[in-house]
Image (cartoon, helix red, strand yellow):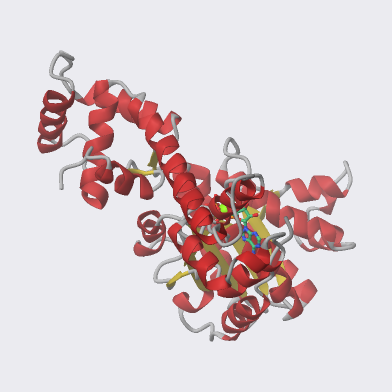
Amino acid sequence: MAIFHRKALADDLAARLLAVPTTSASGSGLFLAAPRRTGKSTFLREDLRPALQRHGAVVIYADLWADRTADPGDVIVAAIREVLARRDGFVARLARSSGLDTLTVGGLSFALDKVGLAQGISLSSALAALSDDTEAMTVLIIDEAQHAITSESGQNALFALKAARDELNSSAHHGLRIVATGSNRDKLAMLRNSKDQAFFGAPLVNFPALSRDYIAWFTAQLPFRQELDVEQVYQCFAEAAFRPEILGGAIDALVFDLDVQPGQYAARLQALVQQQVQASNDEALRVVHSLTPLQSAVLRVLAQAGAGYAPFETLTLARYRATLAAIAPDAKVEPEISNVQQALSALQDKALVWKAARGVYALEDSFLAELMRQAGMLEA
Ligand SMILES: Nc1ncnc2c1ncn2[C@@H]1O[C@H](COP(=O)(O)OP(=O)(O)OP(=O)(O)O)[C@@H](O)[C@H]1O
Ligand SMILES: [Mg+2]
């Protein structure tokens, strides 16, 4: 399916981002938050990146989720290296100015290897050199930024970026802006609430869902477009929580619905969207139903507690016990620190739970708490 471009939104964001004064830390970073599957990455890649480039910025894009096994710190470093490598002669100039050319017997790529964390050339000096070379604003886009705080090296990359930001935003260079996205506000908040983090105080903005314009564009491509009006389709899209794939799935089913009569398309579409939403919710809960009693109890207590979850406190252990007594009275398992730890790491492996490097836990997808509540798995 083709992409609906959101050029006006991208230009607006780009202009704002590049125009903010660099006097404050918050002026140089921006967080965009929106629920899962609503078009964040598509917008960053297809619209925001080109808009920033049109405005004269050099854009570096790092998707911390593209490869879930890769270390977030490495991904950020690799994205920066890639942009450095693309500039003709830049690596040679950088190596020379850093006094590393005597070391580059293996050629230029050897010098590039030296750019990174705790390596020959710091991220900060590499980005500063890029800034001088391009004489343009540098914008670093980090998709799914919350993953940076799940590893030691990811956190180090964030500290390095803070140094780079301060350096590039000084009068000696041409500025650095960092745009980060994520789907979970609790996790993004962890990135911006602590003073020692690169993003301290950066504004958290709700990234807007795809609009009626998108639905008008989408509807115009349908073979039975004369049967539907944009407002009806938009209502269905809203019921699908603004997820294009849910609406798309319902439309696919409608295309092959041989029974639907003229005049019934809108009602049928609505029913199909509800089915798709139900199927997607059931799928999410199926994993939960496959857990052991202790894993299930730990997940329920975590989902109930939200940001206040303290996994190993006495009170929390009592909650696991009470939950176990309610959901699996015959389980004969006594929650203790060691088996709770095991349960949490099993929940992480199943991508239900997320853990920051400093031991804070959260639901991987905050929407799951809502589903569990609807399914009666949490207390009211
Ligand atoms: N502007 C658009 N035009 C057409 N389809 C879109 C658009 N934006 C998103 N989609 C579709 O919606 C789906 C989700 O998009 P995308 O991956 O960008 O969302 P996301 O918010 O980054 O998701 P995740 O939470 O998984 O990172 C994809 O199938 C994508 O093709
Ligand atoms: Mg994404």
Q: Residue 253: x, y in percent?
A: 60, 45
**Left/right of residue 112 with respect to residue 24 in the rendered view:** right
Quarter of the render that holds ligand 1? bottom right
From this view, report whether residue 262 is shown above or below residue 53.
Answer: above
Q: Residue 270: x, y in percent?
A: 48, 56
At a point 81% along the width and 56% down the height, the residue shown is: 85
**Left/right of residue 217 with respect to residue 291 in the rendered view:** right
From this view, report whether residue 157 is shown above or below residue 283.
Answer: below
Q: Relative to the observer, which residue lies in front, 292 or 130?
A: 292
The reply to whether residue 117 is in sight is no
**Left/right of residue 350 with respect to residue 61 in the rendered view:** left
Q: How many marks?
A: 0
Considering the image in quadrants, where does the N terminus appear? bottom right
At a point 32% along the width and 45% down the height, the residue shown is: 371
The reply to whether residue 43 is in sight is yes
Q: Relative to the observer, which residue lies in front, 76 or 365?
A: 365
At a point 64% along the width and 80% down the height, the residue shown is: 8
Q: Residue 36: x, y in percent?
A: 49, 53
Q: Relative to the observer, which residue lies in front, 368 or 348?
A: 368
From this view, report whether residue 308 is shown above or below residue 343.
Answer: below
